[in-house]
Image: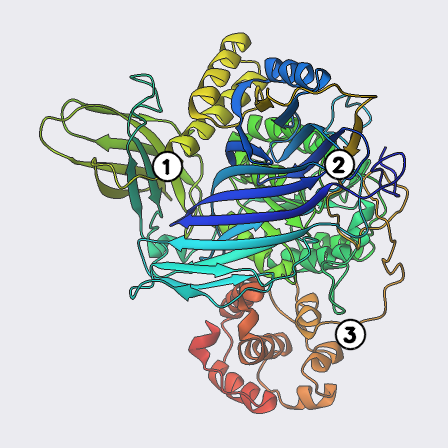
Amino acid sequence: MVNCCGLVSEKNEPVPLKSISVELQVRDHVASVSSCLQYVNEEERPLEAVFVFPLPADAAVCHFSAKIGEQEIVAEVQDRHSARDQYDDAVSSGQQAFLLEESEESSDVFKLSVGCLSPGQNASITIVYIIELSVQADHALRFCLPAVLNPRYKPAASAAGVSEVSSASVIPYTLSLSVEVRSSGRISKLESSCPLDPLQFLDAQHTHATVNMSPGHRFDKDVELFLYYENSHQPSAVVEAGASAAQSGSLMADPALMISLYPEFPADVMSSLASQGEFIFVVDRSGSMDCKLHHGNDAQMRIESARDTLLLLLKSLPMGCYFNIYGFGSHFESFFPQSVVYSEDTMDEALKRVKSMNADMGGTEILQPLKHIYAQPCYPDHPRQLFIFTDGEVRNTKEVLDLVKSHVYSHRCFSFGIGEGASTALITGMAREGSGHAQFITGTDRMQPKVMQSLRFALQPAVVNISVNWTVPEGVTVEMLSPPINALFQGQRALIYAQIKGQSSGKTEGAVTVKYRLRDQPVTNQLQFTLKPTEDTGLTIHRLAARSVIRSLELEQRTGGADAENIKRRIVELSVQAGVSSVHTAFIGVNKDSKQTVKGPLLQRRVPVPTDQKKCCYGYPDDFCLNCVCILEEAEVQKDPLLQLISLQKATGCWELNASLAAVFGKADVEVTNGKAAQVDGSVWATVLALIWLYAYKLDQQVEWQFVAMKAASWIRSQKPDGLSQCVCDGNILLGCQVTEDTLGI
C-alpha cells in the first residue's frame, strides 16, 4: 500500500531526479522521442534510485544509455533474468549499473534502476523510444508525454503487480521539450496543452518546422501536442533499407515497408446509419471519478460529465435497439439484469438511475463486469457494442486485454480515458483488441463530442471480409508483420508493416490492395509504392514492425500458445536483434571501471512521479493524494440549455409542447403555444422549434446533437404533417432565426 506522505527515504530527504529534457522528432505520423533524465546523489552514502514511470503503451523503447562524468555507458538488450542477475552482481560488487525493464503487468509502465551512485555524483540517463501518432476526430495527430502514474488498483485475487510509487505534492524536477517536424505534406499548425514558443518554419514549403516549450514548465500534467497537416488523409508507403550488419534473411536485414491507408467508404452507404445493435455502457464509479476533469474553476466533476454523456447517448440511440448500463468499482452493478429493448419506458427508467449515479463504488476493478457481460448471450442481428469509461489504471491490464481479445468476434469495444491518470495501455489496448476506437479526455476537453464521434463509428455499418493483397515484381515476396485488420472506420488510419524478401531484376514498383465488403457492397482501395528504400530513417520502421510482431507473440504466449518456451525464445531473439523492449528482455548497462568498495548498505530511493493534484483520498486503494483539495460538495450550477433540451426529447425523437421546452427557448409557455398554427399538431410544432433552435444557436456543437436531430427529422417525416413550410416560417419568427426547411432535413 502506498502512503499518502510519499516515501522517498527513511529521512524523507530530497529526490535525486533534477530535470527531464525531451527531444521529439516527427516524420509524418511517426515520432522518435529522446528523454534525458538528470540525477544527482545528495546522500552521504552510495545510492540506488528506482524510478517507475509511464510511457505510451505502443512505444518501442530502442536506446538506453547513461553518462557519469565524462564516461558514457550504452546499454544492450538481454534476456530479462540474465540482465537482472548481471545488475545485482554489478551493484553488490560496487560497480555502477543501470537496468530498464517493462512491467510484466502493463506495457505502459517501465522501471528504471540506477545502481551505486557515489555521494555527490551526477548521472545523466537517456531513453529513446519510437511511436506511431494517433489520429484525432479533427484529423490532428496526437502526441502525449505522460506525466501521471497513479497507484494502480490491484484486485484482491491478483498476486502480481506493478512496483509501488509514492506521490509528491511538489514535483522537484522540471521539463524542457524541443520538437522538430518533417512531413511529406504541408504542416498547417501545431497546438499544445502547455505553452509553446512560436512555430518556426525552416523551408518555404512549410514541410520542416521546429518549436520549443516555453521555459519554466513544471512536469505536473501530461504534455499533449496536436499536429495538423494539409491533406492528412493521403495514403502513403515508406520502404526502409535494412541494417547491413544484421543477420541475412532476418527482419532487421531485409527492407521493411510501412503502409498508411485511409479507406474511402461509399457516400451512399455512410449516409445511412445502423438502426440495430446492442449498446452496453460501462462506467467507472470508483472514488477518483469524484474529482474534477481539469484544474480550471469551471471544471465539471468526472462523474457529472459521465452522467451528461450518458444522457446524450441514451437520447441518441435508435428505436428498437437493445441497451444496458453498468457501473463498476470494487464491485459492479447493472441497470437491468440483461440488455433491454430501447423504448420510452426503458429510456426513462435508465435516465432516472443515471441521475443518481455517484462515484461511490471503491477501487477500479474492470475484469469482473467484462466477464459478466461476455457471459450474456448476444441478440441475433444486433451487434454488441461496448462503451467503456474509466479514469483509472489497473494492475491486471494484460488479463483484461486478453479477455477483450478472446471475444473480438462477438463485439466491438470503444474506450474512453478520462483525465490524465488513465492508462494508455488499458484504453488503447481495449479498443485495439476489441476492433473499436479509443479516445482520451484530458485538459479542458469536453467528453461529449468525443463520445458522440465514437457512437457514429459504432453506428457505421461493419466492414467484413477484409483482405490485403500484394502485387510485386517476380523474385520479390512480401511477408505481413502486422496482425490481421479486424476493423476499418471512415476517417481512421490503418497501418500495415511488412518485410520485403528477395530481389527484383528489373521493376521497382509494387502495389497493395485492401478489399472488404460494406453492406454487401464490395469495396477496393489500392496504393502504389516504390521498392526503392527512402533516405536513412534510423531503422525506425524496422523497430516499429518488430514491436508489432513482439506484441502479437506475447499475446499468443499469454493465451496458451502451443509452445510457450519456443514463443518466448522467438520474442527474446527478435527483441535483441531489433534492440527494442519486450516483457522478456531488459536494457542493462554496467560501468566496469567504477569498482569501489561499497561501505554500508545501499540506500534505495523511490523517485516520485506527478499525480493528479485533484485526486481525492476516500480510503479506496486507488485514490491517493497528498493534499486533498477536492470539493466534496458540488455547487449548484446552471444546467446547460442544450442538455436541458435533449433531456426533454422522447425516445421516438419528438418533443412535447410544454413550459419546460418554452423555458429552454427563453419564452413564456403561452407565447410558444400561441405561435402555433391551428391545424398543426402540438408535438410537430414543438419538434420543429427544437430543430430550429439547435441549428440556429448550437451549430458549433452539432457533433453532440446530430443523432438527436436525425431522430427528430425522421419522426416529423413519419407524421406527414400538413402546412410544414408555414410551421418552419412561424418557428423562425418566434425564435428570431432564419433556418431553412432543407437545413432541418424534414
Q: Earlier in the sequence, mark 2 or mark 3?
A: 2
Q: Position of residue 23 (x, y in %)?
A: 51, 49
Three-letter amino acid code at disc 2?
Answer: Arg
Q: Position of residue 54 (x, y in %)?
A: 64, 39
Q: How many C-alpha atoms fall within 10 Å of the one at disc 3: few (<14), some, or many (≥20)? A: few
469 sits to left or right of 609: left
Residue 152 is tagged as 2
Dot 3 or dot 1: first in sequence order is 1
Tell me the distance, in whole angstroms, between the alpha carbons under discs 2 and 3: 35 Å
Q: Is mark 1 on a helix, strand or loop?
A: loop
Quadrant of the drawing holding the N terminus: top right
Which corner quadrant of the image does residue 587 belong to?
top right
- From this view, report whether residue 102 is shown above or below residue 669: above
User: Label 1: which residue?
Assistant: 538
Residue labelled with disc 3: 638
Q: In the drawing, does residue 600 fall left or right of residue 644? A: right
Q: Which amino acid does the dot numbered 1 rest on?
A: Gly
19 or 466, which is in the foreground? 19
The 10 Å Cα crowd at callout 2, few under 14, some 14 to 19, many 20 or more, is many
Dot 1 alpha-carbon crowd within 10 angstroms: few under 14, some 14 to 19, many 20 or more: few
Q: Vertical placement of 476 versus 41: above or below?
A: above
**Which residue is at a point 46% across and 71% down the rendered structure image?**
745
Residue 499's spot in the image, x, y percent?
31, 27
- Can residue 376 be seen at all in this image of the molecule? no
Q: Could you tell whether 623 is left or right of 561 in the image? A: right
Q: Determine whether 495 is above or below 136 in the image.
A: above
Q: What SS does tag 2 mark? A: loop
Q: In which quarter of the image is residue 470?
A: top left
Its colouring scheme is rainbow
